[in-house]
Image: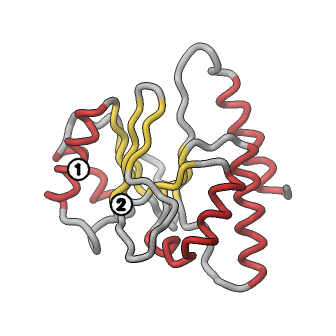
């Protein structure tokens, strides 16, 4: 592991070890896993999978473009990372993914955002998650979509949105 990956694993491990035995924890990674499909990108993907396995990440919520990696690469990533792969998509190719994940009192689901799901469809899915436990919904839409989903299903424990820009300073 190098630089940023090593720091990331270290922080994740220290945050979860300080809580062990007292509170349940759930470690979620949101995609995109890789931008390219060259050999260097595959090596980076394997390094990321090893790091996520070392950090004991529970679930990796795949971004829509991650599905293009295909069944074999996703299966290899899952094996190396020891994580459940989560997606709100159905692909024609059988992929090693789930549409929801449960650990302790938590249940996590993923929806793919505006281009794929309407707010109505996503909120129905969120309601189903809430009926199963303390629900967390991951959206690949932005902060406005996350707020709309939280308003549509107030029983959600949280809505996590994926962004490739700057980290929001305020919720």
Compute the Cα span from label 2 to label 1: 10 Å
Give the SS element for disc 2. Answer: loop
Q: Which image quarter: residue 46? A: bottom right
Q: Is residue 32 above or below residue 149?
A: below
- Which residue sits at x=48%, y=58%? 97
Q: From where the camera sits, is residue 76 visible?
A: yes
Residue 88 is tagged as: 2
- Which residue sits at x=43%, y=71%? 64
Q: Nearer the viewer, residue 118 or 98?
A: 98
Task: Return the residue found at the far bottom.
Answer: 38
Residue designated by label 1? 125
Q: Would residue 79 appear left or right of 4 to someone viewing this image?
A: left
Query: How far across and how far down the image is residue 171, in percent?
Result: 39, 45
Quadrant assignment for the N terminus? bottom right
Q: Nearer the viewer, residue 110 or 84?
A: 84
Query: How far across and how far down the image is residue 14, in percent?
Result: 73, 31
Number of marks in the image?
2
Q: Would residue 6 appear left or right of 84 to someone viewing this image?
A: right
Q: Earlier in the sequence, mark 2 or mark 1?
A: 2
Q: Is residue 57 above or below residue 23?
A: below
- Which residue sits at x=45%, y=69%? 94
Q: From where the camera sits, is residue 171 visible?
A: no
Task: Return the residue found at the far front.
Answer: 94
Give the SS element for disc 1. Answer: helix
Task: Mark 2 and mark 1 in contact? Answer it, CB < 8 Å.
Answer: yes
Residue 18 is tagged as: none
- Which residue sits at x=55%, y=29%? 25
Task: Return the residue found at the far right.
Answer: 2
Q: Would residue 44 appear left or right of 37 to someone viewing this image?
A: right
Q: Would residue 67 appear left or right of 45 to someone viewing this image?
A: left
Q: Residues within 10 Å of mark 2 (few under 14, many from 20)?
A: many
């Amino acid at each position: 592991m190098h630089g940023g990956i090593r720091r990331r694993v270290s922080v994740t491990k220290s945050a979860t070890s300080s809580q062990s035995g007292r509170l349940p924890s759930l470690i979620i990674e949101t995609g995109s896993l890789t931008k390219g499909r060259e050999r260097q990108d595959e090596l980076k993907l394997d390094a990321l999978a090893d790091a996520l396995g070392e950090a004991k990440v529970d679930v990796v919520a795949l971004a829509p473009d991650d599905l293009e990696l295909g069944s074999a690469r996703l299966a290899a990533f899952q094996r190396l990372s020891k994580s459940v792969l989560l997606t709100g998509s159905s692909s024609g190719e059988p992929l090693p993914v789930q549409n929801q994940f449960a650990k302790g009192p938590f249940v996590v689901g993923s929806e793919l955002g505006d281009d794929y799901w309407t707010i109505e469809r996503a909120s129905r899915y969120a309601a189903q998650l809430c009926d199963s436990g303390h629900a967390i919904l991951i959206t690949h839409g932005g902060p406005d979509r996350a707020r709309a989903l939280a308003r549509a299903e107030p029983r959600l424990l949280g809505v996590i949105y994926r962004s490739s820009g700057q980290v929001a300073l305020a919720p």
